[in-house]
Amino acid sequence: MHGRPRKASKPEDEAASAAKAVKLRSLQSQFMTYHHEKIYTKEAIELSTKLLEINPEAYTAWNYRKLAVEDSLSRIESDPNSVKSILDEELRVVENALKQNFKSYGAWHHRKWVLSKGHSSTGNELKLLDKFQKLDPRNFHAWNYRRFVVELTNRSEQDELQYTDDMINNNFSNYSAWHNRSVLLSSLLANRVDGFIPEKKIPDEYEIVHQAIFTDPDDQSGWFYHLWLLAQTVNVESPLLTSSWPSHGSSVILSGAGCLIGSPFNVITFCSETGSVPLILYFDQAVGGVSSLTVTIDSELKGNENLVWEPISNKSSQVSCVWVARLKYLISEPCESKEYKVKVRLGNSPGIISSRGFNFSTPYEFVFTAHVHDTAKDSQERIVSWTDGFELWNAQSKDLNSLATSDQLNAGIDLKWRQAAIDSEIECFRLLADSKIGKLTLARLLMASEAMMSDAVVKGVHYEEILQLYNDLMALDSSHHHYYKDEHSVAFLHKVTSSSESLSRYLFRYRGMNNLVCLRLNKLSLSRIASVEKLLFVQMLDLSHNELHSTEGLEAMQLLSCLNLSHNRIRNFSALDSLRHVKQLKVLDVSHNHIGKHSVDTTRYLCSSPLSNSDWSQDDVRRQNPGLVTKYWDAYFVLRDLNLKQLDIAGNEIAGDEFNSFVLQVVPKLVWLNGQKPGN
Amino acid sequence: MSSASSSQMGQLVADKHVRYILMAEKKKESLESVVMDHLRMNGAYWGLTTLDLLDKLGTVSEDEVVSWIMTCQHESGGFAGNTGHDPHILYTLSAVQILALFDKINILDVGKVSSYVAGLQNEDGSFSGDMWGEIDTRFSYIAICCLSILKCLDKINVEKAVEYIVSCKNLDGGFGCTPGAESHAGQIFCCVGALAITGSLHHVDKDLLGWWLCERQTKTGGLNGRPEKLPDVCYSWWVLSSLIMIDRVHWIDKAKLAKFILDCQDLDNGGISDRPEDAVDIFHTYFGVAGLSLLEYPGVKAIDPAYALPVDVINRIAFTK
């Protein structure tokens, strides 16, 4: 089926084929008779041998042979020599079949089945594998069989590591060997086997993989191994808290649904009908076990001793980078304006564990001040405008999220060898600066270097170069243009959030609603969202006139009440699935996107619904309009979970009378649709 | 790059492909057919799904196909690759998929088929292909896909099944057939598809895997299945559907890929081959057309990237209780 040239068949060839077909057909028929009548005579078994020699893919014949072997074994007297000779014959048949097709699943499995019986010599197997390696060093069947034999014979990981050394020295262009090496090495490092300490081993491995990359920069064999080494250098095993909201030392005004008139300009104000405010913890990796047992709240605000912490993730997952609890603040009515200090502590008792099994162990605490006000007035629903009513906000660093590197990050994580390794790699890859892999690796190394930098003076110095490298790559490797574009957007947002000065240029307060903090990132050619851990304080977000096709990442922005995504490249409501976690969201503008224009939905399985077996709930809308719910399934599931008051969908192919009226059924509390009150 | 446009890069000779498939179906005694006798069920799924994607499913006799399928069912409930052969999970899925195309799942004893599939799950969550115990993440995908179509996913331990698949995740973000096995686009499709169907895509590092997958695009515009291998039309499916499921398909050049697929057509006799100028077969014809569907090529129905069946078939099954 692969690699056969296309040519018109000549009459002689056709005749020869037809004859072969007749012969094979007759073999198959005869074989089937033997198989169905359970005939395991020498003659019958011979026939299956012939069949498998011609066609090793005839899986039923391998099954038959297993039955025949079991039948033969049951007839002899458990004499080890007879047993061995029966099984050796099977190994011979497998070897012949593999000569025909060394990728035959049936043949390899039959060999494993024989070896698993425990009566065959394993000594030959590695020799056989050497033969196959020479024929095709990338044959994954052979590599899998090798791992099977290694386990059977208890060969050490160090010996197998040496084997990958030999393979790579023979020919560096052997991805299969690099892969095996990564499996063995990560196991040896994780088990802290003698001599396998990351700070010694990782730099050695960089040396080794350089030979692969520098000899032929276009050969991918070493690329992914190098990326893995980089991850080993940059990633710390134990989870760390990257940021929180509120952040340490900040002040926040908390009030009821009526909201304050004339709230102070400089302090973040949060209004809620439910009298509770989200407390957000953002970790550097997915963790589980965040609860009132592992996170303690010290405050005079009563009723917060046993907070329920929830992971921001889909329903089947108990782990997440982002955890949220709702801090209650309106205990009694009426309440006088009062100031409360709130201290949040974690890491004192064990229980917060990463998905790889490492504990959050460094005790950490942050303190913020909550000014609680009550309001008697009912809130007035006013339409939100994205064009008027904004004032620039010169935010102080303490109001924003941990823009300075947290002390946590530096606490005992042996930064020295890591920084030295990154610096050394940067020097090396500057020498490859003309090639694609050179530029890409350099950009990644510089990003890593920025992430590790704690000195505020030098921080941010690499971003210009990183952005230029991605621009170069978009031109050099146009097939992967959008990969580099996304990376460029990520680097750009890292740069924007790297200091309060740079972030302040995009920060505003919205007069039209309580001086909400508004981040305006419109018209920046952004194709991807990033740095959300530094933007947890944002209440209004303008991302209009960009190139976004998904809201992936926004789920952590628990304070977000207004979002503008107009004039982007959103193709489906399923792409907005992450917003289902943003319970504060009241105002959403997705006008002038591409919803309804494309037949392919790239977020179909990233959205909770019956398609991914993750949301079966029935309600009246679904019962009464099954056809429309199927037609607009993603709009239904996403909008149903939002508490929107204002929605804009004009300028999308999907918009129209049928869809608009469907939306009003799914979101009955909607006050404005496309700028109008429904019924007008 | 936006979706493929037929005017710029050659045409899809859909009618020729339809004729090629219909003729291949009839040539039961050709050497090629006899050699592939044991996987006729797969071949039928590839051929019939392609016909449906080209809106020509009506050109075959539904009754003939369905009655032949039922002759392949074993007393264990599983289906064989052809009449008389042994049952295997591979052909059980294809049988169920074909019946789904014809909206004839109701003729099955769903309990029997689902018990056969569920019975193949092992203690560690993995799945065997049949009673002889070969384990491979392909079979995990097949079991999950099959039982989901039959709406019997609760018959297996989904959590353990997911756990096993995750244990096959590699350091390059990809997946292999067993723990420790090298990443391969076919296995990646199976694992990502299984995780998609079970709402478990949060286990995938989408950026890491996305980069590995997008680097499968070679200078020819075609996709290979692993680093430093030749491009092949079948990877237009395995790689492309995986990229779509994790929302990273914009990281490849879709127009260049469409052109590569179209260049693999036999413009005279119909059919699509693995590479330009190679011999055509049903397998690559299906993957070529399915790939073009994912690239939104005009005139091809939308295909679901996880179930590998037309979207209208899957939506019908998923949204009706």
Image (tube, helix red, strand yellow):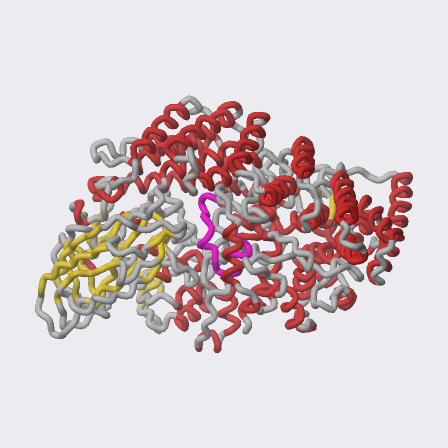
Q: Nearer the viewer, residue A270 or A655?
A: A270
* x 41%, y 71%: residue: A666
Q: Residue at x 48, y 77 (%)?
A: A623
Q: Identify whether B45 is placed above or below A636.
A: above
Q: Position of residue A116 (x, y in %)?
A: 66, 50
Please state if B107 lies on the left or on the right of B224 as rendered.
right
Q: In terms of secondary structure, what is the magenta stretch mainly? A: helix
Question: Could you tell me which quadrant the C terminus of chain A lies in?
Answer: bottom left
Q: Can you give x and y, in whole percent of width and height, for residue B276 in the image?
A: 69, 38
Quadrant in the picture for residue B304:
bottom right
Q: Is residue A83 visible?
A: yes
Residue B300 in picture, x, y percent from top left: 63, 54
Tell me if residue A237 comes above or below residue A251 in the rendering: above
Give the camera-side residue of B93 and A605. Answer: B93
Residue nearest the viewer, comparing A329 with A554:
A329
Which residue lies at the image location 78% right of the left edge and 58% below the top edge? A74
Say whether residue B200 is magenta.
Answer: yes
Position of residue A43 relative to residue A587, above or below, is above
Left or right: residue A487 versus residue A6 is left
Residue A661 among magenta residues: no
> Which image quarter is the N terminus of chain A in?
top right
Left or right: residue A668 versus residue B156 is left
Magenta stretch bounds: B192-210
Depth check: give the residue in front, A290 or B18: A290
In this view, A229 is above or below B292: above
Locate residue B223, reporting x and y percent. 59, 40
